[in-house]
Amino acid sequence: MAKAKKRQAMGRGLSALLPTDENLVQGNVEGKVIELPLNQIETNPFQPRTQFNPDTLAQLASSISELGVIQPITVRKLNDNRYQLVSGERRFRASQSINLKSIPAFVRVANDQESLEMALVENIQRDDLDPIEIALSYERLINEIKLTQEQMSKRVGKKRSTVTNYLRLLHLDPIIQSGIRDGFISMGHGRALLSVADKQEQLKLYKKIVANGMSVRATEQAVKPKKAKTPSTQNYTAKHLDAFKTFFNAPVQTTVDKNGAGKIIITFASEEEFENIRKKLN
């Protein structure tokens, strides 16, 4: 019995120490951490994350069942009885899944734009977002919060080049974006595919990568532009070089570009040699 009571107390976690909204109904809850009924909380419509791994969610639920919620979620108050999630949706969902009645929550004041920015920035800094979700979050910060890439890089603690690399992924064909989200290819594969301007060629190579398990390095090699071969001077100039050298009594070189046009270069070491060459040209 003693062990059961101890386990029950542990399972309450931070909740055991917190007041409820009912205790504070006459006061101001903003800026406080309170124990909040789950049925008074609605999810955040600005939540950038669209996929939640069921296995990791189950692990989190198991941890909460044993130890309680250690870190409070963040909400904003909508009216007297309703709150909206700002951050902590995994903790909220995991608590719902084990039928908890309430959860520790930090209540803060935030308008729609601030709520969106907080949700986006908090999620970007997590390790379990896929590259496309991160890119979409960056895009929303630029379009909806009106941040420049420079401002955003400071806000999220990332180099500007890193932000740019994520945003460029959104130029890929949607099928390839889905492949990155589902883990069929990596962000490195996606960056390599950006070198292919034609969308149909992109898709063709994407299917080849998935079918053959191509590495990022192999993909980079596949999209690398093939260098045009410069026509060899042996085609029509090399066989005449000795004759030129004999005629001018001087070193002679030829260069030929990819279109077949070229130059003859006659080298001289003194004014006397130059005069000899000039006379022969006359």
Image (cartoon, grey):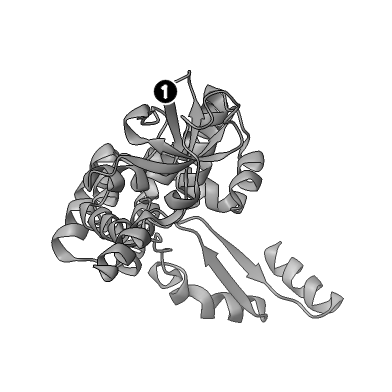
- Look at 45% across and 57% down and name the residue there: 258
Tell me if residue 75 comes above or below residue 276 in the rendering.
above
x, y percentage for residue 96? 26, 42
Q: Say above or below: 109 vs 2.
A: above
Identify whether 227 is placed above or below 72: below
Number of numbered tags placed on the structure image = 1
Q: Is residue 235 shown above or below 64?
A: below
Spot occupied by residue 265 in the image (x, y as percentages of width and height): 64, 68
Q: Secondary structure at mark 1?
A: loop
Residue sitting at x 46%, y 74%: 238
In this view of the protein, can residue 197 be seen by the observer?
no
- Under mark 1, the amino acid is Arg
Name the quadrant of the N terminus: bottom left
Residue 143 coordinates in the image, percent (x, y): 52, 27
Place residue 40 in its image quadrant.
top left
User: In the orientation shown, which residue stands out farthest toward the front?
Assistant: 1
Relative to the observer, which residue lies in front, 114 or 174? 114
Q: Quadrant of residue 249?
A: bottom right
Between 14 and 16, the residue placed more toward the observer is: 16
Q: Is residue 161 visible?
A: yes
- Find disc 1 in the rendering and name its residue: 82
Relative placement, left or right, of 55 versus 95 is left
In the picture as drawn, the residue positioned furthest to the right comes out as 271
Q: Residues within 10 Å of mark 1 (few under 14, many from 20)?
A: some
Q: Which quadrant does the C terminus fall into?
A: bottom right
Residue in the picture at 25% in, 52% down? 53
Q: Residue visible at 23% across and 66% down?
A: 214
* Left or right: 168 as drawn, with respect to 30: left
